[in-house]
Amino acid sequence: MSGKRQKRSLSIHGHRTSISLEPEFWAVIDSAATDREQSIAGFITRLDDRRTVEDSAYGLAAYLRLWSLRYVQQKSGKS
């Protein structure tokens, strides 16, 4: 892991925000969004909506890291 976070700016429901994640997590998110033929902003907005519905105790960046981990585990057959 490179360890150095990459910051990306995007709009979620019309509000500009920045998310800082390690490149490995961005790679998973980019791949998942591409597989679903969604923009990164649209994909992350949907995940943020899910986070809100779940009343998650995690902030958006932590939620994205955990989602990425689960996604990779699911794809590899581990849970």
Image (spheres, helix red, strand yellow):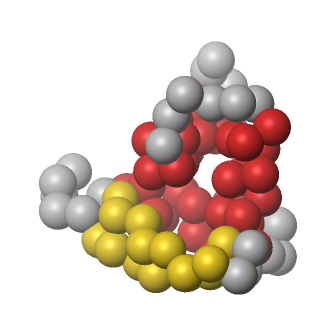
Left or right of 8 in this view: 68: right
Viewer-nearest residue: 17 or 77: 17
Q: Nearer the viewer, residue 35 or 42?
A: 42
Give residue 58's position: percent from left, percent from top. 50, 34
Q: How many marks?
A: 0
Q: Is residue 37 above or below residue 45?
A: below
Q: Is residue 31 above or below residue 56?
A: below
Name the spot of residue 10 as percent of width and height, x first: 55, 81
Find the residue positioned furthest to the front: 15
Q: Residue at x 17, y 62 (%)?
A: 4
- x, y percentage for residue 47? 71, 52
Q: Residue at x 72, y 42 (%)?
A: 52
Residue at x-position 57% and y-position 61%: 29
Q: Looking at the rendering, which quadrant does residue 50 occupy? A: top right
Whether residue 41 can be seen here = no
Residue 48, above or below 30:
above
Where is residue 46, by image quadrant?
bottom right
The residue depicted at 48 percent of the width and 43 percent of the height is 59
Q: In the visual, does 18 lie left or right of 51?
A: left
**Residue 20: in sight, yes or no?**
yes
Q: Residue furthest top?
A: 79
Q: Left of 60 or right of it: where is 47?
A: right
Q: Is residue 8 left or right of residue 34?
A: left
Where does the C terminus fall, quadrant-wise? top right
**Residue 70 drawn above or below residue 61:** above
